[in-house]
Amino acid sequence: MKNDAGKSKQRSLMTKDISNAVKLAGPNPDMNPRLALAISTAKKSAVPKASIEAAIARGQGLSATGAALESLLLEAILPPTVATIIECQTDNKLRALADLRLLVKEAGGTVSPVNYMFEKKGRIIFRPKEGMGPDEVLEPALEAGALDVLEDEEGRVVLFTEPAQTKTTAETLAKELDMEIEESEIVYDPNEDTKVALEDESAAKEFSSFLDKLQEVQGVTGVYTNWSKGSISDELWEELGSKVDV
């Protein structure tokens, strides 16, 4: 069962990478090297052709049948009192909403407004480049409209911007610094004063299971929480972090 969840998570990440590549540089793999690589990687990992095609369509804002997708946000409180925002793109809002509400209920959560605990931001992640860390990027990034610049655990430079500035800032810096954009998207960043420390290992594991089930819901594009590590194990914290977007 755990192995199946791992495979599902891996496939989810691969299809998300395909969609992101399409958003950044279009749906033609001949003109989009990153998309070509993402498709090749997915095929080698036995991701079904239908899933790959659906991911390419989703990157263009379309369903697998070509229907326009609509954005949906579900806000909820999940045990142990963690505010959660689930972002979804779907061609059937009522069905998607019903599916998500059921998962929240089964996990012991409650659908409730939590948006005020987060700040909507643009997030740009650049692939690592020798000699180009946060210090080198800071000045041109601020001039291009960035609000904050940092480095993540994988050595990637991460920028935050106003939502409306995301695309322009990403394209300006990619050209000016000759850096490759890995992700450019709008995210919900939790306010520091609302964060909930995870102290209960058992409850945190239940939350991890809930996130696995979320990945099975077609069209889920982002999950944002206001948790902080607390006293749970490093291994569990890393596992949880790999399943959310912020």
Image (cartoon, grey):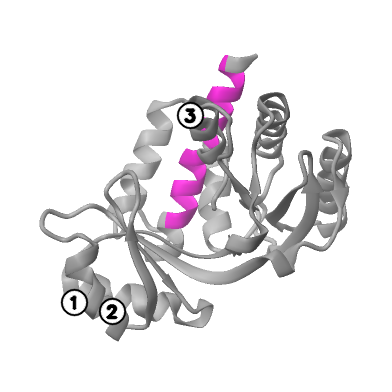
Q: CA distance from mark 2 to mark 3?
A: 37 Å
Residue type highlighted by circle 1: Glu
Q: Is residue 100 above or below residue 172?
A: above
CB within 8 Å, label 1 to label 2: yes
Q: Residues within 10 Å of mark 3 (few under 14, many from 20)?
A: few
Query: Marks 1 and 3, how far apart in space?
Result: 38 Å
Reply yes or no: does residue 11 show up in magenta: yes
In which quadrant of the rendered view does residue 118 lie?
Answer: bottom right
Which residue is at a point 70% across and 56% down the rendered structure image? 85
Q: Which comes before the other along the chain, label 2 or label 3?
A: 2
Q: Residue at x 54, y 51 (%)?
A: 245
1 up-or-down from 52: above or below: above
Q: How many marks?
A: 3
Residue 214 locus on image (x, y percent) = 70, 39
The amino acid type, in three-letter code, at marker 2 is: Thr
Q: CA distance from mark 1 to mark 2?
A: 6 Å
Magenta-drawn stretch contains 219 = no
Determine the image quadrant of residue 28: bottom left
User: Is 65 left or right of 136, judged from the image as shown?
Assistant: right
Secondary element under disc 3, as helix, strand or loop, is: helix
Q: Main secondary structure of the magenta part?
A: helix
The residue under label 3 is 234
Closest to the camera, between mark 1 and mark 3, is: 3
Pointer 2 with pointer 3, Cβ within 8 A: no
The residue at the far left in this view is: 131
Where is mark 2, residue-wise? 172
Q: Is residue 48 visible?
A: no
Regarding residue 107, the answer to whether it shows in the image is yes
Magenta range = 3-20
- Assign the N terminus to one quadrant of the image: top right
Q: Residue shown at 87%/56% (left/top)?
A: 94
**Residue identifier under label 1:** 176
